[in-house]
């Protein structure tokens, strides 16, 4: 991958994170005032360590190493902050596919008192969806969702697709999309 292709991908990732902020503004303006959407960096990894109790260890510290690898150049990472507090993290990668992006990890702060409770997955999926559209993919696939999360994904339009997995079909969006607006 040359520097121009890398710059295009970085631009797509930035646009996808910005889209999360725009959609959050429409979804919940009061919440949007306190939300920042960024990439996953050392600060996010350190903040994640403060999530107690943390019933699931997805190994977020590995993301920093993955981001430096050529093999993960097409992956997108999202950190969602509410004020100074890390509220959620997401890592999605095409894993070499030209038609689907896999949401491999998505996690929210387990503190149920946070104002972002119930919004992290939709916000992250907004960014992944926009990024997948920019890359020209057809599917968003959730890799091995926790059983308690499967129903929530299905309520958001994901369905079990033979040979693909728990997937969201982007083709209806393409049909109604004005590509000049992207």
Image (cartoon, grey):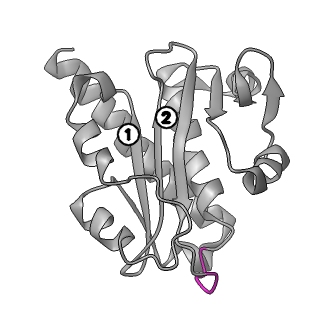
Q: Separation of disc 1 and disc 2 at Cα?
A: 6 Å
Of 32 and 2, the residue lying toward us: 2
Of 170 and 177, the residue lying toward us: 170
Looking at the rendered structure, the secondary structure element under dot 2 is helix
Q: Does residue 144 appear left or right of residue 89 in this picture? A: right
From which residue to which does the magenta span run?
A: 112-116
The residue carrying mark 2 is: 131
Q: Does residue 133 appear left or right of residue 27 in this picture? A: left
Residue at screen point 59% across, 74% down = 116
**Tags 1 and 2 touching, CB below 8 Å:** yes
Q: Does residue 169 appear left or right of residue 142 in this picture? A: right
Image mark for residue 13:
1
Q: Is residue 52 above or below residue 134?
A: below
Residue that lies at the very extreme toward the bottom in this rendered image = 113
Q: Is residue 89 above or below residue 11?
A: below
Residue at screen point 52% across, 78% down = 53
Is residue 115 one of those drawn in magenta? Answer: yes
Residue that lies at the very extreme toward the left in this rendered image = 3
Is residue 96 one of those drawn in magenta? Answer: no
* Residue 68 spot, x, y in % from top left: 20, 36
Q: Number of marks in the image?
A: 2
Residue at screen point 33% across, 53% down = 39
Q: Is residue 140 above or below residue 163?
A: below
Sequence order check, earlier mark of 1 and 2: 1
Residue at screen point 48% across, 50% down = 90
Estimate how packed mark 2 is, as few (under 14), some (14 to 19) or many (20 or more) residues with alpha carbons within 10 Å.
many
Estimate how packed mark 1 is, as few (under 14), some (14 to 19) or many (20 or more) residues with alpha carbons within 10 Å.
many
Predominant secondary structure in magenta? loop
Of 125 and 8, the residue lying toward us: 125
* Residue 65 spot, x, y in % from top left: 23, 42
């Amino acid at each position: 991958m040359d520097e121009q292709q890398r710059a295009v991908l970085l631009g797509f990732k930035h646009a996808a994170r910005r889209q999360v902020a725009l959609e959050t503004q429409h979804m919940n303006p009061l919440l949007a005032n306190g939300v920042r959407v960024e990439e996953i960096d050392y600060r996010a990894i350190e903040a994640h360590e403060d999530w107690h109790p943390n019933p699931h260890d997805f190994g977020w510290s590995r993301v920093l190493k993955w981001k430096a690898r050529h093999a993960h150049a097409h992956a997108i990472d999202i950190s969602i902050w509410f004020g100074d507090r890390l509220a959620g993290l997401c890592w999605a990668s095409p894993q070499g596919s030209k038609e689907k992006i896999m949401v491999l990890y998505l996690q929210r702060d387990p503190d149920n008192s946070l104002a972002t409770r119930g919004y992290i997955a939709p916000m992250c999926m907004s960014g992944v969806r926009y990024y997948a559209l920019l890359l020209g993919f057809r599917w968003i696939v959730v890799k091995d969702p926790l059983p308690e999360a499967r129903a929530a994904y299905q309520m958001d339009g994901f369905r079990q697709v033979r040979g693909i997995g728990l997937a969201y079909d982007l083709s209806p969006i393409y049909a109604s999309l004005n590509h000049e607006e992207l």
